[in-house]
Image (cartoon, rainbow, N blue to C red):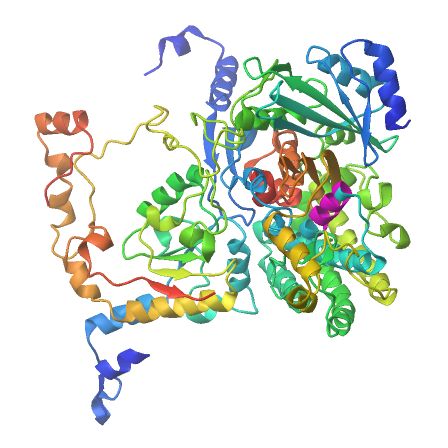
Amino acid sequence: MTPQAAAQQLVEHLGEGVGEPAEFRGEVTMVVGRDKIAAACRFLKEHCGFDMLTDLSGIDNYGEEPRFAVAYHLYSLTHRCSLRLKVLLDEDDALVDSVAGVWSTADWHEREAYDMFGIRFAGHPNLKRILMWEGYPHHPLRKDFPLAGLPADLPATAEEAGRVETANMLGGPYFSGPGQRGTVSREPRQYDTAAEQADKLSSPNKAEPV
Amino acid sequence: MATQREMEIIDSAYRAQLALEEELSGDKMLVNMGPSHPSTHGVLRVILELDGEVITDLTTDIGYLHRGDEKIAENMTYTQFIPYTDRLDYLSPLANNVAYAYAVEKLLGVTVPPRCQYIRVICSELARISSHLLGVGAMSIDLGAMSVFLYTFTEREKIYNLCECLSGARFTTSYTRVGGLAHDMPAEFAPMLRQFLDEIPAAIDETDKLLSRNKIFLARTKDIGVLSRADAIDLGTTGPILRASGVDWDIRKAHPYSGYEHFDFEVPVGTVGDCYDRYLVRMEEMRQSVSILRQAIEKLPEGPVNVDDPKIVLPEKKAVLTRMEELIHQFIQVTAGINAPPGEVYFSAENPKGELGFYIVSKGGGTPHRLKIRGPSFVNLQALRKMSVGHMVADLISILGSIDFVMGECDR
Amino acid sequence: MSSVVNTAVDLRAESRDVVVTRLDSAVDWARKNSCWPMPMGLACCAIELMATGASRFDISRFGAEVMRFSPRQSDLMVVAGTCVYKMAGVVKRLWEQMPNPKWCIAMGACASTGGMFRSYAVVQGIDRILPVDVYISGCPPRPEALLEALMALQRQIEHEKSIENLRQDQHQPRLGGAPVRGPIVVQG
């Protein structure tokens, strides 16, 4: 099985929606329509022995139409050959079927393509940002994004995201040092009246004057 | 005071059993591990869902070392990007340099002379020994065997001396150039390498003796983190992880580059795919690397190290300062970069961590349009979930050590 | 140790084992010779940090081999590597969790100024988020440079007015409360 033979079989199997294979430096590249990519990958994996997805990357051809491309590098361990598939996507409709169901490794690669380019993958189990933080508003590898970056909010801490509550300081922090009061008089919780206790519980982190 | 429920149940044995079940069905805990944690693997964050000590689910959070290498590559010439490749897998910078140089040379369609290929093999194998030494050392210090860490670091210092002799820097070498090397191997390198090759097998054997039949090490790594063959292929893992899971695949044998077809070496393949197998694969790979290095330094051919093309390789300085044509070539290469033809290539090399691939899309000119770095650690880390669920937290440490990932090439 | 000049050794037979010194000297001497680093090993410089802790360069000679990964138990944060914005909040929080007195070494070009990564994701120097005492240049700096930086920091700690700082409110950040000292830059 050579890449050319595999490309030929793919063309026969899918018919339209698959471009002519192109060769450069000994590698075969085929452009596949975006609605055919999942079927193409499944066919190549099951019938041509391309059991490994080596790489999946997004490409931004800013200024050309269609703007985005997704390149899939398939590899066959049994036949020791590789094949590249490309899907071309428009800027305002950058949606393509996910191949995470075909190879599990596509999971993170597709998340990275989404993070860096904004290309969405339909049917992806967990399409979230992976390298930048959740809530980062830009897609850095797009050509119209400058290298030095654009202003963005820093990642939300767990507190801000509401996932974590700070513990109630109850009049603390209680620290030791020369010139401080003794521990008994410093942590007066047992000597607080009910009203003082309620006050401390209701307004956390109010530091006590030393 | 008995609760209403207790009073409803009359049979004491049933009540006792119920009490026991209630004890065991606790809530699950979410525990955060990292990104700053005492493991020498860098800034990885793992969110564990624990039922007691057993991991029921695991989420990996990466990106804490995402430096924007791929975006930087789009703004640099091919030669200017070489120092960035050092910092990808910073445990084996020479190997990254070699892989990147071959990728760009594939795009340009040039082949380097044999002497350069042999020296690059020496670079890659030295980097492999260095990386595996640290991998085994870090794994053992995580498991508590601190002496092994110190011994492997002593050997790595010898490799650093070699790197310094070869390139001038201890470990971020930036030694290769597109079309050749920065400079030829210095005369004192070969005797230093031979001396190192005489000393290193003893060190590998010592590490072997300390760990391979050590009861504690075996208990912590045998049958821990098993990755089946099918899973390993499906998850795209490469390198020692894939070989430990039973797949006999090594790019140096499958698609030989840099003259590897002239070398006689074996590829260790594991059977079970647990942490112990991955450790054994790395130990044996080190021994095979020593053998390859011996062959390389003995059979090193004479000749030039750079491609004879003034448009790719910088001309000699003497000529640049005196003649017009060389001055122009130097000027264009340094300012505009090497003029690559439009097209796209993918080249991958067998790095110590796995398959390091560079996917270069060129639209002509001196800078790449898109440079995608297929970091092996990025792909190998996906297997963490599969390997760890069902094990205990302490086993996770063994598994992290055995995957031997590096966040530099994971996050890029 | 240079605090010898501040001591008077009583050589009379009955009190031969008495050393008289200033409290500051004693405290500073103890602090400088037992700086427990918290290795914030983010990237490649972490490998040189580990090499400094290994047997060839042996940071243990300076009392700093106890690499405490818990901020509560450490004095010296060595930021070794590139700090990216995603990690910056973590570094800052760990810095704040370290108890006083604490010092910081920015190891390497990336920690000092962002290094060669002038990109969208990288903090251009960790002195944007925490106060740095010593900057080490180099990519990565040699272990000798890290040891030189540690020694320079020790020379600085030697002259701190520790007791006076103790008497002041301990929770003021050092830059705001303590006397200002210029940062030290070490060539790596």
Depth check, front residue: A22 or C88? A22
Magenta range is: B98-107
Residue B84, position as x, y percentages in the image: 58, 49
Q: Is residue C140 above or below residue B223?
A: below
What kind of secondary structure does the magenta stretch mostly adopt? helix
| Residue B304 in magenta stretch | no
Q: Is residue B402 above or below residue B328?
A: above
Depth check, front residue: C122 or A183? C122
Horizontal arrangement in the rendering, residue B3 relative to residue A202 (left or right): right
Horizontal arrangement in the rendering, residue B313 relative to residue B12 (left or right): right
| Residue B102 in magenta stretch | yes
Q: Residue B373: which quarter of the image? A: top right
Residue A2, position as x, y percentages in the image: 89, 28
Q: Is residue C125 visible?
A: yes
Q: Is residue B133 visible?
A: no
The number of callouts visible is 0
Query: What's the residue at 34%, 64% (across, down)?
Result: C184
Depth check, front residue: A64 or B290? A64
**In which quadrant of the rendered image does the N terminus of chain A lie?**
top right
Horizontal arrangement in the rendering, residue A206 relative to residue B129 (left or right): left
Residue at the extreme front of the image, as rendered = B324
Query: What's the residue at 41%, 47% (across, down)?
Result: C124
Residue C108, position as x, y percentages in the image: 46, 57
Q: Residue B394: which quarter of the image? A: top right
Query: What's the residue at 36%, 61% (across, down)?
Result: C134
Horizontal arrangement in the rendering, residue B131 relative to residue B62 (left or right): right
Query: What's the residue at 21%, 89% (across, down)?
Result: C10
Depth check, front residue: C2 or A170? C2
**In which quadrant of the rendered image does the C terminus of chain A lie?**
top left
Residue B231, position as x, y percentages in the image: 73, 28
